[in-house]
Image (spheres, grey):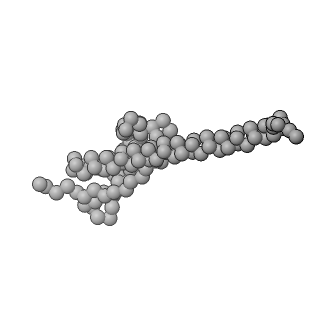
């Protein structure tokens, strides 16, 4: 009759606990990365909508072409690029706004397409 665990049984139990802890840490890491990605995409969407809202508020009538710049939103730095194109109706302009991480500049976090109407006199 034995009164305890053998060394082999203890090692097996520790291995099982270690595997479970690794899985738990990995799941927590994935959750954290997802939350950071969601925050980044939400803020970049706000940057794109802010750019469009500025055009509307200032009653801009931009020329066709490309503009670029940067903006800080929620403590994060973003770069944006606007592609302004003519439409078949000369009273409208199409604006495609893309927002990127300022440090990276390749991976598009948000895209927004909108149209501006020629500003009427008040």
* Residue at (41% x, 40% y) in the render: 79
For the residue pair 120 and 16, the one nearer the viewer reads as 16
Q: Considering only vertical position in the picture, is 10 above or below 84? A: above
Q: Considering only vertical position in the picture, is 112 above or below 81? A: below
* Residue at (38% x, 35% y) in the render: 75
Q: Position of residue 56 (x, y in %)?
A: 24, 51
Count of marks placed on residues? 0
For the residue pair 21 and 31, the one nearer the viewer reads as 21
Residue 85 showing in the rendered view: no
- Classify residue 61 as left or right of residue 26: left
Q: Quadrant of residue 91?
A: bottom left
Q: Position of residue 92 (x, y in %)?
A: 28, 60
Q: Residue furthest bottom?
A: 88
Q: Considering the image in quadrants, where does the C terminus appear? A: bottom left
- Classify residue 20 as left or right of residue 32: right
Q: Residue furthest front?
A: 1
Q: Considering the image in quadrants, where does the N terminus appear? A: top right
* Residue at (22% x, 57% y) in the render: 118
Residue 78 showing in the rendered view: yes
For the residue pair 49 and 115, the one nearer the viewer reads as 49
Q: Quadrant of residue 76?
A: top left
* Residue at (65% x, 44% y) in the render: 23
Q: Residue furthest left?
A: 122
Q: Position of residue 111 (x, y in %)?
A: 42, 52
């Amino acid at each position: 009759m034995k009164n305890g665990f053998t060394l082999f049984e203890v090692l097996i139990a520790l291995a099982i606990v270690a595997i479970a802890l690794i899985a738990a840490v990995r799941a927590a890491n994935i959750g954290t990365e997802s939350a950071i990605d969601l925050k980044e995409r939400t803020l970049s969407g706000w940057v794109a909508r802010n750019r469009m809202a500025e055009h509307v508020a200032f009653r801009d009538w931009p020329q066709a072409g490309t503009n670029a710049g940067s903006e800080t939103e929620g403590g994060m730095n973003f770069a944006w690029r606007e592609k302004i194109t003519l439409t078949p109706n000369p009273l409208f302009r199409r604006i495609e706004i893309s927002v990127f991480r300022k440090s990276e500049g390749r991976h598009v976090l948000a895209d927004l397409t909108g149209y501006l109407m020629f500003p009427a006199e008040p």
